[in-house]
């Protein structure tokens, strides 16, 4: 039932969002960014096993397996947000664009480090085995992204627009 209401709600909200975004930025790239993630959360997630509304849980972020469902959304998002940033003209537009891009940098670091470290972990035969030399550079890259993710969460604690509402120490599954 919830999933059938989402498209109607999104449609009702689209016109004001497009209008508002157009006042903030040349809106095409920003609207495309929000549409990309709207589709992810209202289509991909809702039809996935991670979506547990039937068990009285709604979007339980203590289980990060939803990140497994991300395919090219991160690359497409970066492209769209970079386009938005390049079109920002006024100081206010540039400040808003930078804020949105900074928030995205956390999402990007989370999704890429989760996928990369999970992939590396699945290729090892035991938890004590070292990463093979040919994968060491890639593994180091994903570990840097995981560290960036933790650093951003710490930095965001002092910014009411960026503060992370779910502390990592709440669920061990969020500490990678």
Image (spheres, grey):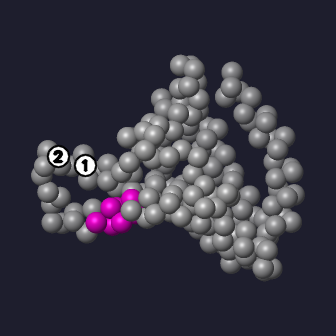
- Can I make out residue 76 in this image? no
40 horizontally vs 122: left or right: right
- Can I make out residue 162 in this image? yes
Residue tagged by mark 2? Answer: 127
Residue tagged by mark 1? Answer: 121
The vertical placement of 62 against 115, above or below, is: above
Query: Badge 1: how crowded within 10 Å, few (<14), some, or many (20+)?
Result: some
* CA–CA distance in space, label 2 to label 1: 8 Å
The residue at the far front in this view is 158
Inspect the magenta stretch and tell me whether residue 93 lies in it. no
- Measured as percent of width and height from the top left, residue 21 is found at 81, 61
- Measured as percent of width and height from the top left, residue 173 is found at 38, 41
Q: How many marks?
A: 2
Residue stretch rendered in magenta on the structure: 140-146
- Measured as percent of width and height from the top left, residue 94 is found at 73, 76
Instruction: Name the residue: 36% across, 66% down.
Output: 144
């Amino acid at each position: 039932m919830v999933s059938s209401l989402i498209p109607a709600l999104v449609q009702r909200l689209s016109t004001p969002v497009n209008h508002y975004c157009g006042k903030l930025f040349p809106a095409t790239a920003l609207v495309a960014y929000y549409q990309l993630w709207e589709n992810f959360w209202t289509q991909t997630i809702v039809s996935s096993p991670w979506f547990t509304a039937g068990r009285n849980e709604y979007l339980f972020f203590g289980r990060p397996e939803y990140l497994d469902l991300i395919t090219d959304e991160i690359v497409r998002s970066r492209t769209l947000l970079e386009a938005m940033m390049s079109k920002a003209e006024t100081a206010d537009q540039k400040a808003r664009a930078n804020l949105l891009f900074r928030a995205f940098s956390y999402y990007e670091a989370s999704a890429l480090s989760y996928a990369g470290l999970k992939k590396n972990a699945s290729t090892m035969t035991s938890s004590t085995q070292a990463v093979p030399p040919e994968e060491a550079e890639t593994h180091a890259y994903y570990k840097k992204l995981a560290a960036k993710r933790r650093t951003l969460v710490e930095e965001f604690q002092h910014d009411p627009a960026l503060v992370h509402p779910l502390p990592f120490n709440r669920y061990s599954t969020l500490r990678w």
